[in-house]
Amino acid sequence: MIAIVDYGMGNLRSVEKGFLKVGVNAKITNRPEVIEKADAIVLPGVGAFKDCMRELTSLELTDAIVGAIKKGKPYLGICLGLQVLFSESEEFGKCRGLDIFRGKVVRFSSGNLKIPHMGWNELTIQKQNPLLNGIKDKTYFYFVHSFYVAPEDSSIIAATTDYGLNFTSMVWEDNIFAVQFHPEKSQAAGLRLLENFGRIVKSR
């Protein structure tokens, strides 16, 4: 069973429905004991980094999530679920993240860009991995965000996207997969990505 973490922020039902469409069993939960027993973890989210960390902490979910990752269980982070993996965010003042990866979450410099970055944009694959099986380079996915991750270790960068600069739109290391875009809003390509995650979980 895949646990979709409910901390009060994110398109949980859309993610759940996406998994159901591709025949993958996923359950929405906010209970640490369910997350600890799950075969894999999905952490979706939209909104502010600080609010996300506050809710995860108040619901006593941080230890369960970090523990599952350290045990090698497959993890899929979506949008905020990518950002909170990093050391800290500069959004509304500095806020500590889960510190799974060293690096910061930083805001797009405005310039001539519309912020938030919203709509369809393409992935440039930097490192092929099981989550991208059957997904071609330059495939379009749907984004909604004003901040992006800046990893200290470039080896975890699996894909980038151009929006005034080439920002990290996907990371991968061992059992950890995380994306800045929303697969649940990305039509066929997004469903393929969710299906791939289901296959990763079954193969463990």
Image: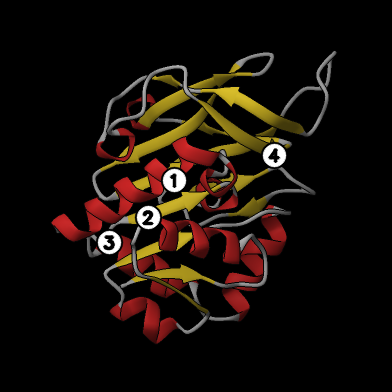
The answer to the question of whether label 4 and label 2 lie on touching residues, with beta carbons closer than 8 A, is no
The answer to the question of whether label 2 and label 1 lie on touching residues, with beta carbons closer than 8 A, is yes
Marked residue nearer the N-terminal end (2 or 3): 2
Marked residue nearer the N-terminal end (1 or 3): 3
The amino acid type found where label 4 is placed reads Val
Within 10 Å of disc 3 (Cα), the crowding (few <14, some 14-19, many 20+) is few
Tell me the CA gap for discs 2 and 1.
Answer: 7 Å
The amino acid type found where label 2 is placed reads Val
Tell me the CA gap for discs 4 and 2.
Answer: 24 Å
Tell me the CA gap for discs 2 and 3.
Answer: 27 Å
Within 10 Å of disc 1 (Cα), the crowding (few <14, some 14-19, many 20+) is many
Within 10 Å of disc 2 (Cα), the crowding (few <14, some 14-19, many 20+) is some
Q: Please tell me the numbered disc located at residue 70.
A: 3
> Who's the residue at 30% across and 46% down the image?
196
Marked residue nearer the N-terminal end (4 or 2): 2
Marked residue nearer the N-terminal end (2 or 1): 2
The answer to which image quadrant residue 115 occupies is top right
Question: Is residue 144 toward the left or the right of residue 116 in the image?
Answer: left
The amino acid type found where label 3 is placed reads Lys
Tell me the CA gap for discs 1 and 4.
Answer: 18 Å
Q: Give the residue pinned by disc 1.
A: 191
Question: Is residue 180 toward the left or the right of residue 204 in the image?
Answer: right
Marked residue nearer the N-terminal end (4 or 3): 3
The answer to the question of whether label 1 and label 4 lie on touching residues, with beta carbons closer than 8 A, is no
Up-down relation of residue 190 to residue 18 (above or below): above
Marked residue nearer the N-terminal end (1 or 4): 4
Tell me the CA gap for discs 4 and 3.
Answer: 29 Å
Tell me the CA gap for discs 1 and 3.
Answer: 27 Å
Q: Give the residue pinned by disc 4.
A: 144
Question: Where residue 3 sits: x, y (%)?
Answer: 40, 71
Q: Give the residue pinned by disc 2.
A: 22
Up-down relation of residue 180 to residue 123 (above or below): below
